[in-house]
Image (cartoon, grey):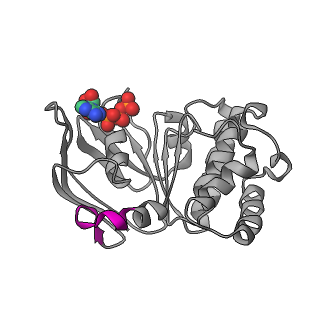
């Protein structure tokens, strides 16, 4: 679970990115975070990943107040989350298999576990046949599926997606959304920040809308709304 309680984030230059935000995300939910450019979506994601620290209020993930985590505990928090970004962020000189394996390598998984788990997750995203390809040999949609496989390979409780369809054509975007829906149905909590109105309107999931750093709406089966 994720609980934000009266969270504000003011950057050192004085700009207020989040202003007294509170919400609760239950395990297994699918939540869109929407809002105009500059409304605070990326800041919110950075707080969840503990890349930024709240100026006030509490961020509680899996019953832990992240502000109270010791430095050595932060890698465990990060391990409970898989993250995908708009720009895929694959390693260009590694194959698809190696890109996914790398995420297991850095947490100290054995060769045996890697040989077993990477093919499983590549099959989940429909890319078993591209295991030996390099990122520049793949379409945008395929690259994002590799990024998803990498995010999922360590079985995270949460998947955080920051504008994951932003660089994709509508068909590839819908394929990514179907995958995210499948992943969510298998029990992973999915939190996706996006500007993609058609996708949000079609999926009919919970929508948290942020405007000027505040929650403007939080609807169970919401739409994108009229903003930007
Ligand atoms: N590192 C930073 N230092 C100072 N101000 C920042 C920093 N990062 C973001 N901001 C400011 O905080 C506000 C929220 O930014 P944020 O990036 O969270 O918005 P966003 O909703 O993700 O926007 P977009 O949809 O364009 O990615 C903006 O006013 C932005 O200028």
Give the percent coordinates (x, y) of residue 21. Answer: 22, 51
Q: Quadrant of residue 26?
A: bottom left
- Locate residue 216 relative to residue 191 in the image: left or right: left
From the viewer's side, name the closer residue of 190 and 89.
89
Q: Quadrant of ligand 1?
A: top left
For the point 53% across and 36% down, which residue is it?
A: 86
Give the camera-side residue of 140 and 222: 140
Q: Nearer the viewer, residue 132 or 122?
A: 132
Question: How many numbered badges does the structure rendering display?
Answer: 0
**Vertically, is 68 above or below 22?**
below
Residue 10 lies in magenta, yes or no?
no
Residue 24's place in the image compared with 227, above or below, is: below
Q: Is residue 226 visible?
A: no
Q: Which residues are magenta?
A: 64-74
Q: Which image quadrant: the C terminus? A: top left
Judged left or right of residue 124, residue 194 is: left
| Prevailing SS of the magenta stretch | helix
Give how far across and how far down residue 175 sits, in percent. 69, 44
Q: In the image, what residue occupies the spot 72% across and 50% down?
A: 98
User: Residue 6: image x %, image y %?
Assistant: 17, 55
Q: Residue at x 62, y 68 (%)?
A: 109
- Let me know if residue 175 appears in the view: yes
Which residue is the extreme one toward the top?
Answer: 228
Residue 141's x, y, as percent? Answer: 69, 37
């Amino acid at each position: 679970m994720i609980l934000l309680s009266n969270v504000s984030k003011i950057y050192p230059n004085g700009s207020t990115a989040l202003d007294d935000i509170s919400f609760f995300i239950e395990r297994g939910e699918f939540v869109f975070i929407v809002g105009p450019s500059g409304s605070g979506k990326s800041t919110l994601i950075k707080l969840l990943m503990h890349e930024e620290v709240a100026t006030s209020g509490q961020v509680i993930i899996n019953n832990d107040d992240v502000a109270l985590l010791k430095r050595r505990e932060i890698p465990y928090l990060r391990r409970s989350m898989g993250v995908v970004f708009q720009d895929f962020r694959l390693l260009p000189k590694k194959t698809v298999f190696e890109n996914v394996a790398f995420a297991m390598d850095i947490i100290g998984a054995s060769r045996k576990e890697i040989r077993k788990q990477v093919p499983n997750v590549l099959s989940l995203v429909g890319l078993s046949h591209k295991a030996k390809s390099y990122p520049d040999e793949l379409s945008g949609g395929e690259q994002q599926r590799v990024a998803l496989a990498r995010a999922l390979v360590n079985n995270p409780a949460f998947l955080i997606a920051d504008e994951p369809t932003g660089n994709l054509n509508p068909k590839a975007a819908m394929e990514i959304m179907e995958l995210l829906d499948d992943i969510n149905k298998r029990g992973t909590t999915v939190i996706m920040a996006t500007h993609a109105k058609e996708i949000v309107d079609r999926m009919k999931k919970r929508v948290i809308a942020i405007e000027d750093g505040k929650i403007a709406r939080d609807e169970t089966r919401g739409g994108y709304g009229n903003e930007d």
